Each structure stands twice: as structure tokens, then as C-alpha cells.
Amino acid sequence: MASLDFEGRKVQLENGDTIASALYRAGVRIFSRSFKYHRPRGLYCGTGDCSSCILTVNGEPGVRSCIVRAVDGQNVTRGNGWPSSDNDLLAVTGRIRASLPTNAPYKSMLKPRSVWRVLEPLVRGLTGIAHVSMDAKPKDRERRAHHPDLLVIGGGVAGLSAALGAAQSGKSVLLVDEGAIGEKLPPGPARSTAQQLEQQLRAESNAKIIEYATAVGIYEGPLVPVAADDFLHMVFPARVIVAT
């Protein structure tokens, strides 16, 4: 059975798991510690919009585990907490927060400069959410160009409806979503509608859907770079609909 390695512990995976869902089912409740006071953080939004469940995956820090698919053999660790995220002795800073004003680590110790040079490494070591490897090499990712009549960013009901309408009118359509279509919708009418629209859109020969692909921005041209696991998709659309 597929599993990932979580801090030396094997966690079994089920079909459709994200990293967060697999860990939560295995009993993990503390996913990270807050930046300053090291307060425990667990699953919160479940949609990748907060920072509570960010983990280090295969050496890459800052991964939003609630929207990243779990894959057999992944190595997953939490980024901060000493000696561990479950039992973090640095959480004592929360007890003395009255003596640590908002700007304490950033401005109040800047002078004299000679003292700050000594304190800065300590402050940096006690704060933060993970350590970034300075030896990591940049990833080589192939680029793929697309020239659709319409690019739709966002695969909810609105985005799918717009894409389907354009495809049925004869336009070439590319729809991208940072997750799986419909995964952020709770069970009910909205999800059912999204699933029906997705099936209809996939049946259109002039339409394409790319999931787990993040539109980075809309640039002059227009040019929309879309970062996915397989390619950096360079999209040159005639028109863009943002339905995020």
C-alpha cells in the first residue's frame, strides 16, 4: 500500500489523499508553529489560502499540504519547533509576549549595531517556519506554449460555465485550476453542477483542462505563465476570464 514518510513514521495513503488529509487521518493535529510565539497551528482553511498547514516536502519548505497530492514515497517534515513541533519548548515565548512588543525582533535591538550582529543569528534561528537549503539546485522545467482563443483561470461553476459556453460557440478554450476541479466545493448542488459542467467541457474537442496548475500572473501580450508539476505552461490567449 502506498505511504509517505512523516518524520520517520510511515503514513498510509488512500486514493485522493492530500498530504494533510493523510496526516490528519493518522492522528497529526499540529502541523506547524506560529512565526513568533510558536503557538500550535493545525488544519484551518483546507483550501490553501492560509499558512497553518505548511510543511517541508522532499526538502522543499512552505508546501501547502492541504492542496498538494500525497504521493508514495514522499518525505514530509514540519518546519519549526524544538525539539519537535508537538513539544516545542520555544512556545514559552507566548507566556512572555507582554514583554515582546510587535516590533521586538525587528527594530528594538538594531542599536547598537555591534549587539545586533550577535543577536541577529539568534533571532533568525528562533523565528521562521522552516530552513531553506542553500545547496538546493533550481529545477529544470520544460515550457509548453498554448495559443487558445480563451483562457479561463479558475474551475468553479462560473469558470466552467464560461469555458463551456465559449467551447460550444467554436472557440478554443484552456481552463486552469490550482487544484482538482470541484475539490474545494462541499458536497451538494454546487459540486454536482461543477462535476456535470466538467464532464461536458471535457467532451468538447476544442477545450482542455489543466489541473494542479497555478496561473502566476497576467502580463502584457497577454501572457499568462501557468506553473504545473510537469511543465511551465506559457499561455498566449486572445482573451482571459479570471474566475478564481
Image (cartoon, grey):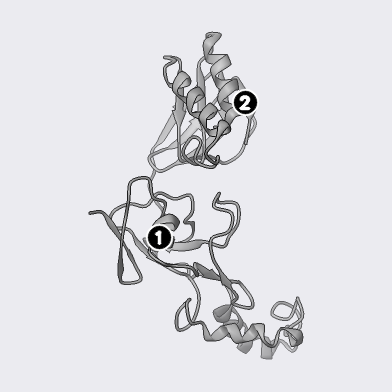
Secondary structure at badge 1 equals helix
- State which quarter of the image contains the C terminus: top right
Q: Is residue 181 above or below residue 15?
A: above
89 or 171, nearer to the observer? 89
Q: Residue at x 69, y 80 (%)?
A: 105
User: Quick one: which residue is furthest to the left in this view?
Assistant: 1
CA separation in Å, label 2 and label 1? 39 Å
Left or right of 51: which side holds 29? left
Left or right of 5: which side holds 182? right
Image-quadrant location for residue 36: bottom right
Q: Residue at x 67, y 86 (%)?
A: 95
Query: What is the total number of numbered labels drawn onto the structure image?
Result: 2
Secondary structure at badge 2 equals strand
130 or 49, nearer to the observer? 49
Q: Is residue 144 visible?
A: yes
Q: Residue at x 73, y 81 (%)?
A: 104
| Amino acid type, callout 2 | Val
User: Quick one: which residue is furthest to the top in this view?
Assistant: 169
Q: Residues within 10 Å of mark 1 (few under 14, many from 20)?
A: few
Residues at marks 2 and 1 touching, judged by CB atoms closer than 8 Å:
no
Q: Is residue 168 above or below residue 63?
A: above
Query: How far from the left and from the top, in percent, is residue 37?
Result: 63, 78
Q: Is residue 222 visible?
A: no
Q: Is residue 101 above or below residue 78?
A: below
| Amino acid type, callout 1 | Arg
On residue 25, which mark appears? 1
**Between disc 2 and disc 1, whose residue precedes?**
1
On residue 240, which mark appears? 2
On residue 93, which mark appears? none
